[in-house]
Amino acid sequence: MFVRTLKTADTLRSARASRARRLALMGALALVGACGDSGGVTGSSVGMPTDSNSASDGETEDTSDGTTAGPMTGASEVTDSTSNPDTDATTTDSTDTSNTTNNPGDPLEIHCDEPPEGAVGTNFEHFFQVSGGTPSYQWSYEDLPDGLLTDGVSGYVNGTPTLAGVYAIEITVTDVYDQVAVETCTVVINDKLSADLDALDGPCLKAGESMLDYMSGGNGEPIVCSVPGGKGNGVLPDGLTVDESDCTTQGTIAELTYGTWAWIVEAKQGDVSVYAPYCASQLLQGPQSYKIEGWHAGGDHLVPATGTFAPGEDIKFDGDMEPRFEVSGCDGPPCYHQTFASFSSSPFGTGECQDDADSCFGICPLVPDNNEPDGDKQLPCELMEGFAGLEHELWAKGGAVSEPFEDRVWISHQTIHYCMGDTQELCVGGIDVIKENGNNSNLEFAIIMRPE
């Protein structure tokens, strides 16, 4: 019994030694699997035979060197999680994706970006946009409004439209990889900014009225009003201004002369200007001034007269005693008179009439005369019959208007001073004598000229 027990112990020690050798071999094989190349043995693929007398996987045994050996797990748990030094660089697509808009895989897309409204005669510009694809892009357009242009290599469109309408523009963009996008963008081109002067209640706008109420077309941008002054723009009396935003007349006339002033107001939107005539009257005369009356087709002497002109042709305002004015104030008979008339700068007073004996302006009757180079001749003013006074008309001539005036309204404004007396010498001596001896009798009157 004792001998059998010793033999069994020897056998157990031998099994333990055999198991230790197998563990050492398993560790070496696992190390080869971990450190070898991609063709080496890996720990997960090793299967070692087991001793039939060995302990179960869950048993813990005392080894000959006093250490403790647990279940064999080290070799079988080695996996591919350790990177191979020859292949551990991250594999990516060769295309740089740091900018997705340059990735040929990104879809190419055109963006209309809400084009602004345009108008005939007004400069238009807009940038259409593109995303995705790869620059450089080639752009093409179908059905662009007349007057608009593009460079073909960007989404920039600009120019001056010539025809109003709603345009469905087909835009095609091609990138360097021949990726193509097509989009339809709508652009609205309105009529040219304009003012309907035929709708005015009279020849000009008066206090409380605004030309904005008679305007149409344009691109919707703000409109700014001003009084330009200068040639063809009439005379704005002292004390009055025009509001730049609502285009109405503000203030009170500070002039002492009698009659009606007329001036032009310019309404500007972008680079387009529209013009309209405004007017205001001073109804008080000096206490000793002559009585002044007048008539013409458009009203009395306090209402501006109107005329028309054809671009490219000589201009003329002469209604054959229309307008007609009567000025009474002479103590005579006998009765003598002197007048002084000043005309504001306008297209009247230009061209061949400057060399004519009758000049370019007058207040006495102008009658046809084939013996004159220009076919007419001014006669002396006549004294009125039945009571002491002066009867006269008003006329003006000129060459063809210059380009800035061909399609717009313009004004010639006159200031006329009167003097009458029973001696001829009473009113001779210039404007100061006429004003003083004529008791500051005067009349402000305007002619508003519109293109045919």
Image (tube, rainbow, N blue to C red):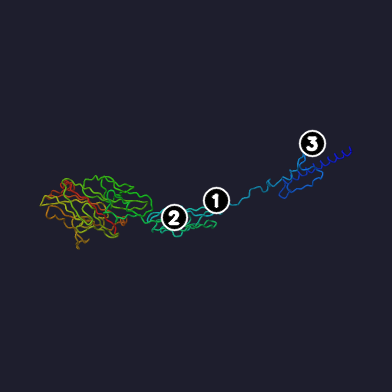
Q: Does residue 115 appear to the left or right of 258 in the view shown?
A: right
Q: Does residue 47 appear to the left or right of 103 in the view shown?
A: right
Q: Give the percent coordinates (x, y) of residue 398.
A: 25, 57
Residue beneath disc 2: 157
Residue shown at 31%/46% (left/top)? 243
Q: Nearer the viewer, residue 272 or 370?
A: 272
Type of residue at label 1?
Thr
Of circles 3 and 2, which is in front? Answer: 3
Residue beneath disc 1: 100
- Quarter of the picture holding the C terminus: bottom left
Type of residue at label 2?
Val
In what element is the residue under mark 2? Answer: strand
Residue 66 badge: 3
Total numbered labels placed on residues in the image:
3
Task: Indicate the quadrant where residue 162 lies.
Answer: bottom left
Q: Nearer the viewer, residue 234 or 21?
A: 21
Of circles 3 and 1, which is in front? Answer: 3
In what element is the residue under mark 3? Answer: loop
Earlier residue among tags 2 and 1? 1
Q: Count residues near mark 1 (Cα–Cα under 10 Å), then give few for <14, some for 14-19, many for 20+.
A: some
